[in-house]
Image (cartoon, helix red, strand yellow):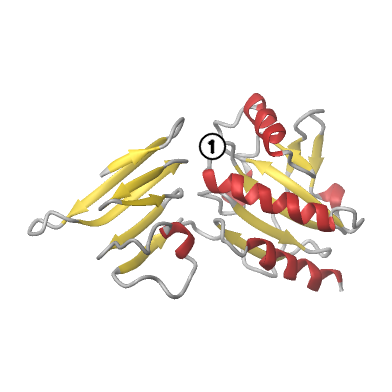
Amino acid sequence: MEKKGSKYSIYKWAFINKHTYLPVVVITGTQGGEMVINNTTISMDQYTRISFGNITEQTPDLDYLLGDASLPKGVVVLDHQPAIESFKVGEVAPAWRLPELYSGKLISSDSLAGKILILDFTSTWCFHCAEGSIVMKGLYQKYGKNEHLRFINIFSSDIDTRGKVEKYVGKHELEGLTLINASGSNKAYGVQGYPQFFIVGRDGRIAFFQRGFSANLDETIGKELENLLR
């Protein structure tokens, strides 16, 4: 196995079939980057556990396919971004009180009561977080002027310092409210990998959540917002 990428760290455990000497299971915990297995480049997200059968040229982005019911032949998902959920759709969203990136002013969920909140738990070092940020920016440009909505970027990784977040926000031109030092919210929201998305309704209850990035994220969240705004 070969690992590629720059400025990332990756932790992986490979279980090898003792008869064929081929990888059976690869468990990774990454911060960006990608891997090459059997001459196939695979973008790996955090806390991904996959059983590899016959990896083919048609399986370059296994993490995108994890949410798809039609996985390629020979690829079986054992577990993806495992987390103990302390919430369910319809339950009251956990409260938070976090500093805003530039002013340092503490913003609370209570102060935004009655608004529809789009929460993006993200990080500065995650490849798919950057993709998620692009989607969030597009959604903000479409819905951001609606007075009933608030788009919120939440940086809850311990390694995301204020300086790193400021650089990330500038590079990706993030829109909406950006909150930092949010590691204390990870347990309440069941965040063990990035990105993770939530929509909290006007009633303060969780209306939607999704772990990880998906190619149809903009469409999925867009539909949820349209329903909530009716």
Q: Residue at x 65, y 33 (%)?
A: 168
Taking 9 as reference, is 98 left or right? right
Q: Residue at x 70, y 64 (%)?
A: 221
- The amino acid pointed to by label 1 is Trp
The relative height of residue 136 versus residue 97 in the rendered view (above or below) is: below
Residue 102, image x, y percentages: 79, 28
In this view of the protein, which residue sits in the foreground, 226 or 106? 226
Residue 64, image x, y percentages: 48, 60
Taking 125 as reference, is 200 left or right? right
The relative height of residue 103 versus residue 184 in the rendered view (above or below) is: above
Q: Quadrant of the C terminus?
A: bottom right
Residue 185, image x, y percentages: 63, 45
- View extreme (top): residue: 163
Q: Residue at x 37, y 62 (%)?
A: 59
SS state under label 1:
loop
Residue 10, image x, y percentages: 38, 38
The relative height of residue 139 versus residue 168 in the rendered view (above or below) is: below
The picture quadrant where one finds residue 62 is bottom left
Q: How many marks?
A: 1
User: Around disc 1, counting alpha carbons within 10 Å, would you say few (fewer than 14), some (14 to 19), or many (20 or more)?
Assistant: many
What residue sits right under mark 1 in the picture?
A: 125
